[in-house]
C-alpha cells in the first residue's frame, strides 16, 4: 500500500504489471501449456499467480499447490532464468535494456 512506517520515505516508481516469465529454452522444448509447466511461486502465499490467473481469464485449471516457492520476485526471476520453470515477474523489471 506504499505505507512502510513513520521513519521510512517512499516514492512510487511505476505500477506493477505481473507477467509469466521463463527461460527461452523452456519454450524451445515445446512447453507451451502452462498447466504442464513447472511453476515457480515468488511469494510463499502464491498470490502473484492467483492474481495473474484471475486477471488473464485463463479457463484451464492450474494447480497452484505445485511448484517451487520462493520469498521474492527476484528469487523467482533467478529460478526462471536458470530454466527451472515459469515464474511471475514484473514486466518493467523483466525487460532487457538495450543501450
Image (cartoon, grey):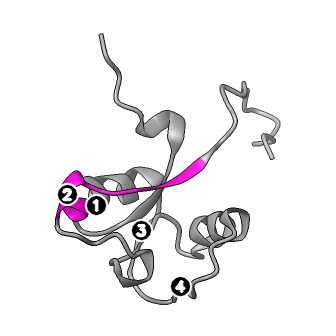
Rendered-image quadrant of the C terminus: top left
44 is within the stretch colored magenta: no
SS label for mark 1: helix
Residues at marks 4 and 1, CA–CA distance in whole angstroms? 20 Å
Earlier-in-chain disc, 4 versus 1: 4
Image check: 15 left or right of 72? right
Q: Which residue is mark 3?
A: 70
Earlier-in-chain disc, 4 versus 3: 4
Tell me, for residue 82, which label it has, or none.
2
Residue extending furthest toward the top: 99
Residues at marks 2 and 4, CA–CA distance in whole angstroms? 22 Å
14, above or below 32, in the image = above
Q: Which residue is mark 4?
A: 62
Image position, residue 22 (x, y; %): 32, 57
Image position, residue 10 (x, y; %): 72, 28
Residues at marks 1 and 3, CA–CA distance in whole angstroms? 9 Å
Amino acid at each position: 500500500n506504499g505505507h512502510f512506517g513513520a521513519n521510512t520515505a517512499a516514492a512510487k516508481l511505476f505500477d506493477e504489471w505481473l507477467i509469466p516469465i521463463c527461460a527461452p529454452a523452456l519454450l524451445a522444448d515445446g512447453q507451451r501449456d502452462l498447466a504442464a509447466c513447472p511453476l515457480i511461486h515468488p511469494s510463499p502465499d502464491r498470490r502473484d499467480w492467483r492474481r495473474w490467473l484471475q486477471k488473464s481469464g485463463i479457463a484451464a485449471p492450474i494447480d497452484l499447490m505445485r511448484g517451487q516457492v520462493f520469498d521474492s520476485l527476484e528469487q523467482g526471476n533467478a529460478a526462471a532464468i536458470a530454466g527451472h520453470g515459469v515464474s511471475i515477474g514484473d514486466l518493467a523489471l523483466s525487460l532487457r535494456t538495450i543501450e
